[in-house]
Image (cartoon, rainbow, N blue to C red):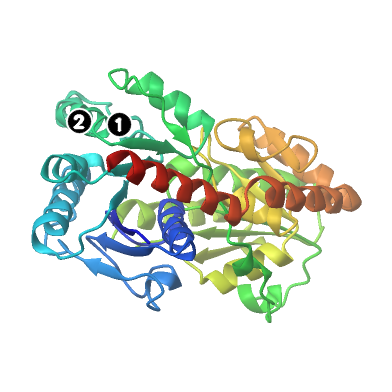
């Protein structure tokens, strides 16, 4: 049995957090002892495994600012992770055999230079490509952070990414790192989606409307997720179908502390009103896992709108729940969604999305068959058992080579 300590900046609700929780559960099921160190953890806004004691969580560094007057979020994240690593190495008695960190690589130098313990770094996507560099002030601010990201990432014993798409971007971006990262696809814990859903769709979204066909969008309320595409495509579809009883449910991770979440949620609601879709679109913010599962099991098609998404766990969740997926033809969905078999890969245009939405609306039997094929694909290629085995082998190889 090994002890593995995870370092994660903000243990909320999102794809990165789900990956960390699943990795901890996977190693736990293999007989290892796991512990997560984070700078922020809100029991009211987290995955249940981190709240009910399944995975021990230690909070360190929450006293450090998350931003400075709403700015400098990246710098503050670096400082908070730097503190978390100092705490783990010098102030705690955890004594792990392996470190697993992700999102912010600033902790790696402390872990590597202060100990001989191997470090796994899971790179969801290079942060420097996600940050804005539009003005000279932002370029000046980001320059040292971008340099630090590349140099600290290169210090990891092993780097892992979530898709072959991300692996290619990683190599193109971090040119000084000559070692190609390994690919470890995120997975689904099927048991969480196999439980019975006791509520009807109408009760979950709080409406008594008759809904003949329901489209679902699940993503964080961030502008880069291109959520307006789903609303505009739905509006165009509505104009095609007239009085058809169709509905769109917009589900998003929402954190009131994040200005963009608050602003973009309001922007999407205004967009819905401007298209006169108010009664046909429902917005949900950070619903429970039970509610999310109920939606996936009772809606008819998933709309996945991010362009060049690093991986995207939501299409897998939808396919396992037998929903066809309409996604943008770039990034992770190219590796998860089979075009014309488990859904459609489209150009990120309103017209292309609306066309495929109408086709599935008109061809219900095809939508059902796509859903069945999608479930089988997830079971064959993205199972939790496969993920657990690969991660356990990686940890074993690291500890064997370090002794």
Place of residue 207 in the rendered image (x, y in percent of width and height, measured from the top left): 66, 75
Name the secondary structure under disc 1: helix
* Drawn side of residue 209 relative to residue 94, left or right: right
Query: Residue at the spot x=17%, y=56% of the render?
Result: 84
Disc ID at residue 393: none
Residue 373 visible in the snapshot:
yes
Place of residue 357 in the rendered image (x, y in percent of width and height, measured from the top left): 76, 45
- Mark 1–mark 2 distance (CA, rounded to whole Å): 8 Å
- Residue 173 against residue 218 in the figure, above or below: above
* Drawn side of residue 236 relative to residue 271, left or right: right
Query: Residue at the spot x=68%, y=81% of the render?
Result: 198
Quadrant location of residue 352? top right
The residue to which callout 1 is attached is 128
Place of residue 230 in the rendered image (x, y in percent of width and height, measured from the top left): 61, 46
Q: Which of the two residues, 249 or 54, is positioned nearer the viewer here?
A: 54
* Drawn side of residue 28 relative to residue 164, left or right: left
Q: Which of the two residues, 293 or 219, is positioned nearer the viewer here?
A: 293
Query: Residue at the spot x=31%, y=64% of the render?
Result: 35
């Amino acid at each position: 049995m090994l002890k593995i300590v995870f370092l994660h900046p903000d243990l909320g609700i999102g794809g990165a957090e789900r990956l960390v929780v699943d990795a901890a559960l996977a190693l736990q099921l293999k007989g290892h002892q796991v512990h997560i160190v984070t700078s922020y953890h809100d029991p009211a806004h987290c995955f249940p495994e981190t709240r009910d004691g399944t995975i021990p969580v230690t909070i360190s560094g929450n006293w450090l600012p998350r931003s400075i007057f709403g700015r400098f979020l990246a710098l503050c994240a670096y400082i908070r992770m730097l503190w978390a690593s100092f705490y783990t190495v010098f102030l705690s008695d955890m004594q792990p055999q392996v470190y697993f960190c992700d999102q912010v690589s600033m902790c790696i130098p402390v872990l590597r230079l202060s100990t001989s313990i191997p470090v796994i770094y899971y790179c969801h996507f290079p942060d420097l490509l996600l940050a804005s560099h539009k003005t000279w002030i932002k370029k000046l601010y980001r320059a040292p952070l971008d340099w630090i990201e590349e140099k600290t990432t290169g210090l990891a014993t092993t780097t892992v990414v979530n898709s072959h798409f991300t692996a290619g971007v990683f190599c193109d971006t971090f040119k000084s790192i000559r070692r190609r990262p390994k690919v470890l696809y995120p997975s689904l814990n099927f048991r969480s989606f196999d439980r019975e859903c006791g509520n009807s769709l109408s009760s979950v979204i709080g409406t008594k409307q008759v809904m003949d066909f329901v489209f679902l969008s699940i993503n964080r309320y961030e502008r880069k997720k291109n959520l307006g595409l789903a609303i505009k495509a739905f509006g165009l579809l509505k104009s095609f179908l007239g009085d058809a009883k169709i509905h769109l449910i917009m589900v998003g991770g929402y954190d009131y502390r994040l200005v963009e979440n608050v602003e973009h949620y309001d922007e999407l609601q205004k967009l819905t009103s401007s298209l006169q879709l108010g009664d046909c679109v429902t917005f949900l913010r950070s619903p429970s896992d039970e509610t999310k599962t109920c939606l996936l099991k009772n809606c008819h098609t998933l709309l996945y709108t991010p362009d060049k998404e690093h991986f995207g766990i939501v299409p897998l969740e939808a396919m396992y729940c037998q929903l066809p997926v309409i996604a943008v033809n770039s990034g992770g969905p190219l590796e998860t969604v089979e075009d014309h078999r488990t859904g459609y890969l489209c150009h990120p245009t309103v017209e292309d999305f609306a066309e495929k939405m109408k086709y599935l609306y008109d061809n219900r039997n095809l939508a059902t068959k796509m859903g069945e094929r999608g479930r089988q694909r997830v079971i064959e290629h993205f199972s939790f058992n496969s993920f657990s085995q690969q991660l356990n082998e990686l940890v074993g190889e690291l500890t064997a080579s370090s002794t």
